[in-house]
Image (cartoon, rainbow, N blue to C red):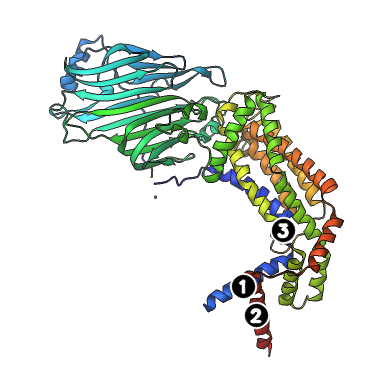
């Protein structure tokens, strides 16, 4: 199925953006008379129409070990695994590495027991590990012809290193005899995060019971990499591609599971780093689960989520044959875009719909270009300036609409007084006034609506942009995380939950800027109209909400909103003082009134309907 779950942070982001839009709509709101006109239109249209699913827990456990110095234990082990006891037991490991990533593969289970990023460190300068100390397990579960149920994690494999051109190849074989084995084959290329991985068997068609299920199971607990585990956990999520090109995700904030068909790849995302298993031929089915391990902010918690995937495997001629790839690396579009065969860049949370498209194809490459020759913080400032300038025509349209409505307000008020006892007539005359003046009462709302995709795309860009990870600017040491000017260790109920145990300066500056912007545009005399939100309350609420929520958000986003509001204030002052001339607007409206205005079909139909309704009302009074 298509992705159908929206994480709580996206919802909160929409609430904040929606609040800003409410304010913008209020600035361009229709007057009560205009609302009555719109209401009358709706009533006439309606009148004309009437005439005609508890999530089971799956824990990640380390593979059991045996004492290889204990001959009795070894004998018992070989007796348990039957024919696969042919392979010598050894706890040795083999390392595969290039300049980007280091992998350690164990003889026990033939699986990766350590995956380390060689070019990245955590917030406290520790190397970034995706697999370490038993946080992951991978194995094939199958039944044998002598009624044993085995897991390859419990088998010992014999390693063999070789070269395939510039590539390093590691073959791990769990043998039944010299020519009968289960093989895991890893092939690492130079300077590449993608590692080829093949699972195959030879001569096991009489040993593996093809009549019983054969399952591939992959478990992993996400290792904490950031100073705020709650913040990191927001963007730690199981994502998968299925049914050709559909991208879906399990829940970000709660335990979740799903069963899907035709799965191409599975990504265990850990915010800025991902562990991905991709297959050349789709898994026919995959049972996926994600368990949230973070309940509150903690400086000592080590893991974010526990992931599990179980894929039933079909044998080919009684043999195992799977051609796959492992990816251990950054969740960076510049890297993942190299793997077009799988479209791994789709695992990045750009946002959905048009918001994600804007983020991925406009803001991400645009910021990458700017940051290639500018300091990262300055690049944000420059991008903000250019975005606001690009949107200035929309801002101008909004202010122009406000100015026109302001000019017409005396005449609308006069009509209201003249026809205060006849609402229908007042609506008709108001519509005529708008039509003659060439003014649309709803035109001011359109600019606000056009800006929403920009707002939300940027809301997703800053926390997920790998280019901002650990990049400092002024007092912020990481533009992809929150900045801190003061912090405390004591847990304060409610405050710690919603605000955190620190104070960030950029959200304070952004909140102050938006507050002054609202003050300048609304003024002190903000009338409360019946049926409309209390906008004076929202004027104070919105900066407060931004102050609270963005305290734990990416400082780059707060920096953007701070600079953006400053620029918007500047553009507003320039437009009002030097571009818009209310006298000229008034004169233009008067000229428009003199010109004959031809009604379109809709306007004529609405006028006729309103006239009929008025006539019916008169008949009803008689």
Question: Can you see residue 480?
Answer: no
Mark toward the start of the polypeptide (1 vs 2) = 1
Q: How many marks?
A: 3
Residue drawn at the location 30% of the way across and 28% of the way down? 323
Q: CA distance from mark 1 to mark 3?
A: 20 Å
Are circles 1 and 2 on residues that touch, CB within 8 Å? yes
Residue 278 located left or right of residue 370: left
Instruction: Read off the residue under disc 1.
Output: 43
Mark 2 residue crowding within 10 angstroms, few (<14) / some (14–19) / many (20+): some
Instruction: Read off the residue under disc 3.
Output: 29
- The single residue placed furthest to the right in the displayed view is 583
Quarter residue 3 falls in: top left
Residue drawn at the location 36% of the way across and 20% of the way down? 112
Mark toward the start of the polypeptide (2 vs 3) = 3
Residue drawn at the location 46% of the way across and 31% of the way down? 269
Mark 3 residue crowding within 10 angstroms, few (<14) / some (14–19) / many (20+): many
Residue 59: x and y in percent read: 37, 32
- Secondary structure of the residue carrying tag 2 is helix
Quarter residue 392 falls in: top right
Compared to 133, does 284 lie above or below?
Answer: below
Question: Can you see residue 336?
Answer: yes
Residue 197: x and y in percent read: 33, 23
Residue 330 located left or right of residue 401: left
- Secondary structure of the residue carrying tag 3 is loop
Compared to 15, does 382 lie above or below?
Answer: above
- Secondary structure of the residue carrying tag 1 is helix
Residue 431 located left or right of residue 62: right
Instruction: Read off the residue under disc 2.
Output: 613
């Amino acid at each position: 199925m298509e992705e159908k779950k929206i994480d709580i942070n996206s919802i909160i982001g929409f609430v904040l953006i929606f609040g800003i839009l409410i304010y913008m709509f209020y600035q361009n709101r229709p007057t009560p008379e205009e609302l009555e006109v719109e209401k009358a239109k709706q009533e006439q249209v309606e009148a004309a129409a009437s005439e005609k699913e508890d999530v089971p827990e799956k824990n990640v456990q380390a593979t059991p070990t045996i004492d290889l110095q204990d001959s009795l234990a070894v004998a018992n082990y070989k007796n348990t695994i039957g024919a696969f006891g042919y392979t010598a037991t050894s706890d040795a490991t083999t390392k595969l590495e290039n300049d980007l990533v280091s992998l350690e593969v164990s003889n026990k289970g033939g699986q990766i027991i350590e995956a380390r990023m060689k070019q990245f460190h955590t917030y406290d300068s520790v190397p970034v590990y995706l697999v370490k100390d038993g946080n992951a397990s991978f194995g094939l579960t199958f039944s044998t012809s002598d009624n044993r149920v085995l897991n390859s994690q419990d088998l010992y494999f014999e390693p063999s290193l070789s070269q395939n051109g510039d590539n390093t190849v590691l073959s791990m074989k769990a043998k039944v005899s010299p020519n009968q084995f289960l093989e895991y084959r890893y092939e690492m290329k130079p300077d590449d995060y993608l590692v080829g991985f093949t699972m195959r068997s030879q001569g096991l068609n009489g040993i593996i019971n093809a009549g019983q299920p054969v399952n591939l199971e992959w478990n992993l607990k996400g290792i904490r990499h950031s100073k705020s585990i709650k913040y990191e956990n927001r963007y730690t999520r199981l994502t998968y591609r299925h049914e050709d090109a559909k991208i879906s995700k399990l829940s970000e904030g709660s335990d979740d599971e799903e069963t899907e068909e035709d799965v191409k790849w599975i990504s265990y995302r850990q915010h800025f780093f991902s562990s991905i298993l991709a297959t050349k031929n789709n898994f026919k089915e995959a049972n996926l689960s994600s368990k949230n391990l973070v309940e509150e902010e903690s400086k000592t918690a080590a893991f974010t989520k526990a992931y599990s995937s179980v894929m039933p495997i079909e044998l080919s001629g009684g043999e195992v044959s799977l051609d796959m790839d492992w990816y251990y690396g950054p969740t960076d579009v510049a890297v993942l875009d190299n793997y077009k065969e799988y479209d791994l860049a789709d695992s990045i949370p750009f946002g959905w719909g048009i918001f994600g498209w804007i983020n991925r194809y406009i803001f991400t490459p645009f910021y990458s270009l700017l940051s290639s020759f500018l300091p990262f913080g300055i690049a944000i400032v420059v991008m903000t300036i250019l975005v606001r300038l690009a949107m200035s025509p929309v801002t101008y349209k909004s202010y122009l609409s406000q100015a026109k409505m302001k000019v017409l307000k005396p005449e609308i008020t006069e009509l209201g007084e003249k026809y205060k006892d006849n609402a229908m007539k007042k609506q008709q005359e108001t519509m005529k006034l708008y039509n003659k003046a060439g003014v649309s009462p709803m035109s001011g709302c359109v600019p606000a609506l056009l800006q929403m995709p920009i707002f939300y795309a940027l809301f997703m860009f800053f926390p997920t942009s790998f280019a901002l990870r650990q990049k400092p600017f002024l007092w912020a040491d990481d533009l992809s995380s929150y900045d801190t000017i003061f912090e405390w260790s004591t847990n304060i109920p409610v405050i710690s939950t919603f605000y955190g145990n620190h104070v960030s300066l950029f959200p304070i500056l952004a909140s102050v800027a938006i507050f002054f912007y609202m003050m300048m545009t609304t003024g002190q005399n903000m009338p409360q109209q019946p049926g409309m939100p209390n906008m004076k309350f929202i004027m104070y609420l919105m900066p407060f909400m931004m102050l609270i929520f963005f305290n734990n958000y990416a400082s780059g986003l707060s920096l953007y909103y701070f600079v953006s509001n400053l620029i918007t204030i500047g553009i507003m002052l320039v437009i009002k003082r030097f571009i818009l001339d209310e006298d000229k607007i008034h004169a233009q409206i008067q000229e428009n009134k003199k010109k004959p205005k031809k009604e379109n079909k809709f306007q004529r139909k609405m006028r006729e309907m309103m006239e009929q309704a008025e006539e019916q009302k008169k008949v009803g009074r008689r």
